[in-house]
Amino acid sequence: MSRTKGAMTVAEAGRRGGATTAERHGREFYEEIGRKGGKTTAQRRGSEFFEEIGRKGGEKVKELYGPHFYGRIGKIGGDALSMKYGHEHFEEIGKRGGQKVADLVAKGRQAS
């Protein structure tokens, strides 16, 4: 993309416009318009649309990085959480999950 004196490319104009908007409105602006756009898309297309694009995205990632990619990044994430919160964190959330299951089982028994 060549430029003549004083002219700019479309990409550069877009970059500058985006930077100016970010300076004027801040992160919250983008969060809000993203939320509105997501809500509108959900109303127009339904949850199946998001399921479909999520599935397609997952397939593309699997195609690009291989089937073991998710396992590797899951391990990296788990290790990072372990370093940040310690072993006790996992014990606590495990107990909470177990208690939730026990409560649901008890509730199911009472209902029948």
Image (cartoon, rainbow, N blue to C red):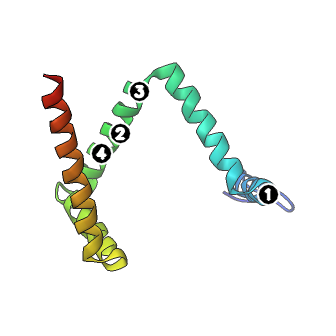
Q: Say if mark 4 contacts mark 1, CB within 8 Å.
A: no
Three-letter residue code for mark 4: Gly
Local crowd at mark 2 within 10 Å, few (<14), some, or many (≥20)? Answer: few
- Nearer the camera: disc 1 or disc 2: 2
Which SS class for mark 4? helix
Sequence-wise, which precedes: disc 3 or disc 2?
3
Q: Is 36 on the left or on the right of 107, as rendered?
A: right
Q: Position of residue 71 (x, y in %)?
A: 19, 61
Q: Say if mark 1 contacts mark 2, CB within 8 Å.
A: no
Give the residue pinned by disc 4.
58
Residue at (35%, 75%) from the top-left corner? 85
Give the residue pinned by disc 3.
47
Q: What is the spatial separation of the Cα atoms under label 2 and label 4, in whole angstroms? A: 6 Å
Q: Say if mark 2 contacts mark 4, CB within 8 Å.
A: yes
Label annotation for residue 54: 2
Sequence-wise, which precedes: disc 3 or disc 1?
1
Give the residue pinned by disc 1.
20
Sequence-wise, which precedes: disc 4 or disc 1?
1
Quarter of the image where one finds residue 51? top left
Q: What is the spatial separation of the Cα atoms under label 3 and label 2, in whole angstroms? A: 11 Å
Three-letter residue code for mark 3: Ser
